[in-house]
Image: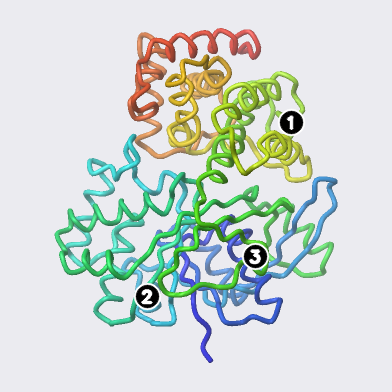
């Protein structure tokens, strides 16, 4: 019997260290009813994709425990590597196959082209370009353009319903990706496809978690030394692994609960804990560590100044607004810092700082708004944007020790903030970052105080 298929868009390190691992674990139990087909919908990383395809989709994963001990596993759950071409022929062919029951995707927070309110940014240039491409039967470059093409072909092939599963660090990722897709199809004017998607797809919310640094040559060398296998596609991750999914699948799913995936009615409390206590704290450590002159996340956790900022943020401002919760929030906070402090991971500040502009509205602004609505102080959470502003200012001055990687529009916005007459007011006044809290005098005052504190703690040399 042909196995059911998950077609995944975004063949990056996180997918290979997370979703592919869970399916491998299920296959290891003897359940071979599902397989993965994975590729990229943009031409980046073509050389890596070709390497992985030459290896039949298999690779070695090195995982590092908190005590530094390594483990090496062979992952073979990606049975089909989909090469990129400008018309996405490989993806379209698989989308037309009734055996494809789930289309999942990892495109990073910025890849959803969302406005400050969480809706599709219909003014974004990439969305306009993809609408033009879609009217010509082309996929364009965004998730929505690719899905529109694949789902139209699936509709015409009468291949049946399919689940659309987001695997990104985005609050309510299923709801938001679905709303973005439906808005895109409305703008496209394809009424038949819009109706079919509404009736024949589901979009579960999900929370994903595993620290996965960018692969390096050192990982390849360690894998060869430990296993005797030369594997240019080897990668490394921490041993911790978590996936929480809303059980809302329209066309079946793997029995993930057998291998540790938490299938729940609502992802919300797990998602809020992860996004606010892990993702935001991760950025805090990356920004503070950068200002302190460190290169790696674990160095920032060991720096008393950086650790104090992350702890105060989590303890003073986040945990009170998330309580009550089914998650033991204090234990979760402590586990997060323990994971960040794993020196063997050697996760870089540069990797975590990437796409920082999108992380403020997703990870930090909700706590600001919650505390302001409750009339509570925001000194601890305001330290995070103050740290980010200092990093931006060093970037603009050419003093950042690495290349800051972000979307072009975000880089432009960051430069505009730094060159404004009052950078603090410009940062605090951005509706794209803070939504309804933008320009609130309490937010302006708290970030200004935070910026002064950052200058004292991390003076520029």
Which quarter of the rendered picture does the C terminus lie within?
top right
Please name the residue shown 68% across and 25% down the image: 311
Q: Does 278 sit left or right of 304 as displayed?
A: left
Mark 1 falls on what kind of element? helix
Tell me how far mark 2 sits from mark 1, CA to CA. 45 Å
Q: Is residue 96 above or below residue 265?
A: below
Please name the residue shown 33% across and 36% down the image: 117
Please name the residue shown 34% across and 25% down the image: 436
Image position, residue 167 (x, y; %): 50, 56
Tell me how far mark 3 sits from mark 1, CA to CA. 28 Å
Residue, disc 3: 21
Residue 142 lies in quadrant: bottom left
269 or 364: nearer the viewer = 269
Q: Does 101 sit left or right of 77 as displayed?
A: left
Q: Is residue 329 above or below residue 145?
A: above
> Label 2: few (<14), some or many (≥20) within 10 Å?
many
Mark with earlier residue (2, 1): 2
Residue, disc 2: 95
Q: How many marks?
A: 3
Find out whether the residues at labels 3 and 1 contact each other: C-beta distance under 8 Å: no
Residue, disc 1: 299
Residue 435 lies in quadrant: top left
Mark with earlier residue (3, 1): 3
Q: Is residue 419 above or below residue 230?
A: above
Tell me how far mark 2 sits from mark 3, CA to CA. 23 Å
The nearer-to-camera label among 2 and 1 is 2
């Amino acid at each position: 019997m042909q196995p059911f298929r998950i077609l995944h868009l975004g063949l990056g390190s996180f997918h290979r260290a997370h979703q592919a691992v869970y399916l491998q674990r299920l296959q290891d139990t003897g359940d071979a009813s599902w397989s993965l087909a994975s590729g990229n919908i943009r031409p980046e990383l073509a050389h890596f994709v070709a390497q992985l395809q030459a290896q039949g989709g298999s690779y070695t994963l090195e995982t590092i425990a908190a005590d530094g001990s390594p483990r090496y596993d062979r992952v073979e759950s990606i049975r089909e590597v989909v090469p990129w071409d400008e018309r996405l022929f490989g993806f379209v062919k698989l989308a037309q196959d009734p055996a494809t029951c789930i289309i999942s995707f990892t495109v990073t927070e910025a890849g959803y082209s969302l406005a400050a309110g969480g809706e599709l940014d219909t003014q974004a240039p990439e969305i306009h370009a993809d609408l033009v491409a879609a009217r010509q039967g082309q996929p364009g470059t965004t998730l929505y353009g690719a899905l529109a093409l694949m789902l139209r072909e699936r509709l015409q092939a009468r291949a049946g319903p399919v689940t659309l599963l987001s695997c990104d660090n985005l609050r309510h990722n299923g709801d938001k990706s679905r709303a973005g897709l439906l808005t895109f199809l409305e703008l496209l004017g394809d009424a038949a496809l819009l109706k079919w998607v509404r009736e024949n797809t589901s979009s579960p919310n999900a929370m994903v978690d595993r620290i996965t640094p960018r692969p390096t040559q050192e990982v390849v060398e360690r894998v060869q030394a430990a296993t005797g296998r030369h594997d240019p596609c080897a990668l490394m991750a921490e041993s911790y692994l978590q996936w929480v999914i809303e059980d809302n699948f329209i066309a079946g799913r793997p029995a993930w609960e057998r291998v540790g995936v938490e299938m729940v009615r609502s992802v919300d409390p797990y998602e809020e804990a992860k996004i606010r206590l892990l993702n935001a704290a991760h950025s805090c450590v990356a920004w503070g560590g950068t200002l302190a002159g460190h290169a790696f996340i674990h160095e920032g956790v060991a720096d008393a100044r950086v650790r104090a900022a992350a702890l105060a943020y989590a303890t003073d401002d986040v945990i009170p607004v998330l309580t009550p919760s089914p998650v033991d929030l204090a234990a979760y906070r402590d586990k997060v810092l323990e994971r960040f402090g794993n020196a063997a991971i050697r996760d870089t500040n540069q990797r975590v700082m990437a796409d920082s502009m999108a992380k403020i509205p997703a990870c930090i602004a909700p706590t600001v708004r919650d505390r302001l609505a409750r009339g509570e102080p925001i000194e601890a959470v305001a330290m995070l944007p103050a740290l980010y502003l200092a990093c931006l200012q060093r970037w603009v001055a050419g003093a950042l020790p690495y290349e800051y990687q972000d979307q072009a529009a975000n880089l432009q916005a960051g430069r505009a903030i730094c060159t404004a007459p009052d950078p603090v007011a410009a940062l605090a006044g951005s509706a794209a970052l803070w939504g309804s809290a933008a320009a609130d005098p309490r937010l302006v005052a708290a970030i200004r105080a935070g910026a002064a504190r950052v200058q004292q703690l991390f003076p520029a040399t």
